[in-house]
Image: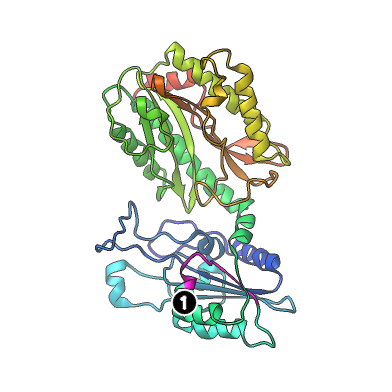
Amino acid sequence: METQPGTPFEAPPRDLLAARRAALLDSIGVGVVLLPSAEPKSIEGEGDYPQDSDFRQHNDFYYLTGLETPHSWLVLVVDEQGRQSATVLIPERNPAEERWTGPQPSFADAGRISGITDVRAVTELPEVLRRAVMWRQSPLPVFTSLNRHTRHDEVIGELLFESEVAVSDVAATLASLRLVKDEHEIEMLRRAIDATAAAHRAAARAAGPGMYEYELEAIIELNFRLSGAERVGFPSIIGSGPNSVILHYDKNRRQMESGDVVVMDIGAEYSYYSADVTRTIPVSGKFSGRQREIYDLVLGAQNAAIEAIRPGTTVGELTGVARTWLRENSNGACGQQTCDAYFVHGLGHWLGMDVHDVGDYSTPLLPGMVLTIEPGIYLPDENLGVRIEDDVLVTETGHEILSAGAPRDPDRIEALMREGG
């Protein structure tokens, strides 16, 4: 696979990139797709504080080009005769800037990585766009990213938003295409998830009373890097004791105590694809009877939902399976209410280039979709929160748990913790 100079990313194969672009143009019928790249963040006093890297490409742009170049544009055209074309426009190389920022791809590099033969300087964008949209009896419709800087670019604004051109947001169309993963995407997800599972195992071996949550976070994110992941998919959630019931707690500053559980909701990102795996473990190395009671309820609900995953099912139906299981098996464990009352969030979400990936949740499951299944029970009065989350691939015949490398059986968790760090 081709990659850009100086980066470890594994770009999608050119034939897959071409297939994605063709599928997008087939979806719109006739028109022009205009997509800008992401822009670099600033660390020079303008309010951006990048955690890991000052540039990450916009997902849709990367999905269609495999390029990480900022200040770039993609123009795709399908005309009235069904002829398709692609042009990518990138900045010309600037040796003086590259002394500070590192080498950027040449036109030849960009063509080799993306498989697009028409690569031009970004300064040619106005002319390329006029030719694509305007040089016809009637302008072609344009599909673009209306919520990004297309509206604020002076030239683009004049050409599209101050004329009679029909302009639509392409986000929903791209989201539908990205919902079913191709073979490259599934492989990148496997690597991200394997890195995350390895980090969970390392954290379970190391955890113990007296550690700070941030120490566990450091062990986790070190293992991400040791597995080849470029960054975190989202800020790591390491919530112990009273923090275990805070769904998106990510300060990770508390010192863990004997008798606590700790919820570790983490995800490595590998080549633009993010994992999202949660495990709840006993800080002292052994679940108390009460912790085990709640843990087993959450695990039972999760198993019931996972077993129901197959093509044709919906996320809503899976949610119903998990909540029904909790209602029917609570047996007073959560007091006067059944335990589904303490399951206060959704069952799961799509997974891919974003940790909460794009896509319509009413869509029936299809082979190639990847989603999380993450029931939880949160009891603030007891400082006891349990969440178990796995990443699941929909297959032709049912499902595959991609995150099985992170133990979730309570006996296996305790055995892993006995191994020590």
Three-letter amino acid code at disc 1? Phe
Residue nearest the observer in this picture, 161 or 181: 161
Residue 289 position by quadrant: top left
Residue nearest the observer in this picture, 89 or 338: 338
Measuring from the top left, give residue 346's x and y in whole percent. Answer: 55, 37
Q: Residue at x 66, y 41 (%)?
A: 394
**Is 64 placed left or right of 203 in the picture?**
right
Q: Which residue is mark 1?
A: 107
**Could you tell me if residue 181 is visible in this image?**
no
Residue 238 position by quadrant: top left
Q: Please say if 81 is above or below 38.
A: below
Q: Residue at x 73, y 79 (%)?
A: 80
Residue 267 position by quadrant: top left
State yes or no: residue 147 in magenta: yes
Instruction: Check the image and tell me how it is coloured.
Output: rainbow
Measuring from the top left, give residue 250's x and y in whole percent. Answer: 36, 39
Q: Please say if 327 is above or below 195.
A: above
**Could you tell me if residue 414 is visible in this image?**
yes
Screen quadrant of the C terminus: top left
Q: Residue at x 64, y 55 (%)?
A: 176
State yes or no: residue 118 in magenta: no
Q: How many marks?
A: 1
Q: What's the magenta region? A: 141-151
Measuring from the top left, give residue 338's x and y in whole percent. Answer: 57, 19
Q: Please say if 194 is above or below 385.
A: below
Measuring from the top left, give residue 384's x and y in whole percent. Answer: 42, 22
- Crowding at label 1, few (<14), some or many (≥20) Cα neighbours within 10 Å? some
Which secondary structure, mark 1? helix
**Is 81 placed left or right of 373 in the picture?**
right
